[in-house]
Image (cartoon, rainbow, N blue to C red):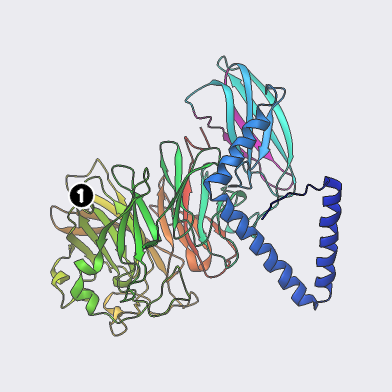
Amino acid sequence: MSRFTTRLHPRTLRWILAAIAVIVVALLCLLPQPDVNATVRQTRIERLNALVENVYTADFQQMRQEQLIAERDEEPRTIDDIYVKDDPYATNTRSLYVYFTTEHPATVSYTVAAEGYPDFSADAYEGVDGATTEHEFLVLGLLPDVTNTITLTITDETGGTVERVIEREGLGLLGTEEVRLGQPVQPAEGVDLGNGLYAILGNDSDDQDFMFYYDANGVLRGEVPILFYRSHRLLFDDGLMWFSASTEKMAAMDRLGRLVKILDLGDRYILHHDYAFDADQNLVLLATELNRSDGCVQDQIVKLDTDTGKVTPLLDMGDMFPEYKMSTDHAGIDESDLSATGKWDWIHFNTIQMLPDGSALLSARETSTIIKIDDLEGAPTLDYMIGEPSVWAGTPQEDDFLTKVGDFPDTGGQHSIAYVDDPALSDGQYYLYMFDNNYGSAQTRPDFDWTVIDGIVTKYSIATEGAYSQYRRYLVDESAGTYTEVNAFDVPYSPLVSSAQELDGGRVLIDSGLQGLFGVYDESTGELLAQYRMKLNTSYIYRVYEYDFKGFYFA
């Protein structure tokens, strides 16, 4: 069979495409108006999904890289001929690539201004420490569909400055998020919340998923499309930012927005809920093993080699806790595939923290237990557990709990545990803080009486009168075999998901996920300093963490 190619004149091609568009519009007009709206919306979603799938490929990223360099290097780019390009790698619609050279070494800062919004200012990180003559960076924070005035301040090594102004119409949003969040509690005069950005991790959507960055004024400064599901946290290493782009892919982005690594977990495992770097900067992930005959989900730990992409199983928790597992009801869901049936979510890990000695701390929501595993990547063994021991009554682990010192209740379905190594503490001591959902329920333990934990809430509704969750901080003493509560305060009730993060300056960031609320609190008093409300796409915001992006986006 012979093959041939017909080349159409560009004008002829435009007429053909226009004719097709007219026909499509005419056909849509024959449908009832609700059907037209639904069809247009569905078509838009499918096109957007396809676009994002293409973005997360090496070929697309290489193509964009070649286009960018070719355009940029067509002519010399000086301080009077600055090259800019919107969202060059299709990874952040609120970003602008900037490139130019200066005769003498200099640093650059910028301010983004748009009518009706507070300014956003930052010092650009250019991949080097100090001044340079070649300037290449991203400006973050352009607002959609309005004129953004970007003022670049270029400072040489003598302190002399010059300014250049760029006007740019911000790209439209790919999603439907708010450009400015509601602020039920605004910072009091004199309260400085810093220059970090709040990363919204998991405002899950049935259409297209994103990471969002918001500033302290609640204004959108980043819209990063991902494939689906959610990103769970951002990890930084050697100039790259790692995050989950789906249940199957981990991605590494450079400071200019280029995806330089896109690693697939293969067909045996999918990610759920969390990941951390080990000592070799490989990723240790909470995972579900696919196609299991027993239907178990969310009970595996695997390692992803960030150089080779190889996936290695580390621990099947069913092998470590067989008696407890068999004591539970065969119930639960696979949160990454809500259509799946017959799942057995008997332990449900939601957080992993890797410790310097190769051990790991795990938060097990379904048992309301915090679990310490030694030598996770070698020959894993149980070290100890923290929580309500009676949950594990009748199993070999019921005597493996640290002793509680003090009169305080244990946790109910805690999330977002965090390990803090404080050099001021004695050997064997560390701090552990978390979002305590304070919710007593487990599908796989329907007969367990969670009211054994004082003050626990057993109703799911966030409207439950008097219900609250808590920020909690423990002092763990491994040498003494004890844990003590050293700080706690009440926060808006969220029976599932949510996060806590200790910030600089004695402040704590809390996401009460099912309420769509996150806020900054004074750590010592529990006073709410600022609060933001985000419109929920489906059910909740999974986590909110603040990042300063120093040495990545910002100097």
Judged left or right of residue 42, residue 553 is left
Query: What residue is shown at x 44% (from left), y 63% (from top)?
Result: 498
* Residue 535 location (% of width, % of height): 60, 64
Q: Residues within 10 Å of mark 1 (few under 14, many from 20)?
A: many
Residue at 49 percent of width and 55 percent of height: 245
What kind of residue is marked 1?
A: Gln
Pinpoint residue 93: horizontal percent, then vertical percent: 63, 48
Q: Which residue has dot 1 on it?
A: 429
Residue 183 can be seen, yes or no: yes
- Judged left or right of residue 419, residue 19 is right
Q: Secondary structure at mark 1?
A: strand
* Residue 186 visible: no
Look at the image and give the residue range highlighted in magenta.
Answer: 105-127
- Which residue is nearer to you in this view: 268 or 155? 268
Image quadrant in which you'd find residue 538: bottom right
Picture quadrant where residue 453 is located: bottom left
Residue 116: in magenta span: yes
Vertical position of residue 530 compared to residue 437: above or below:
above
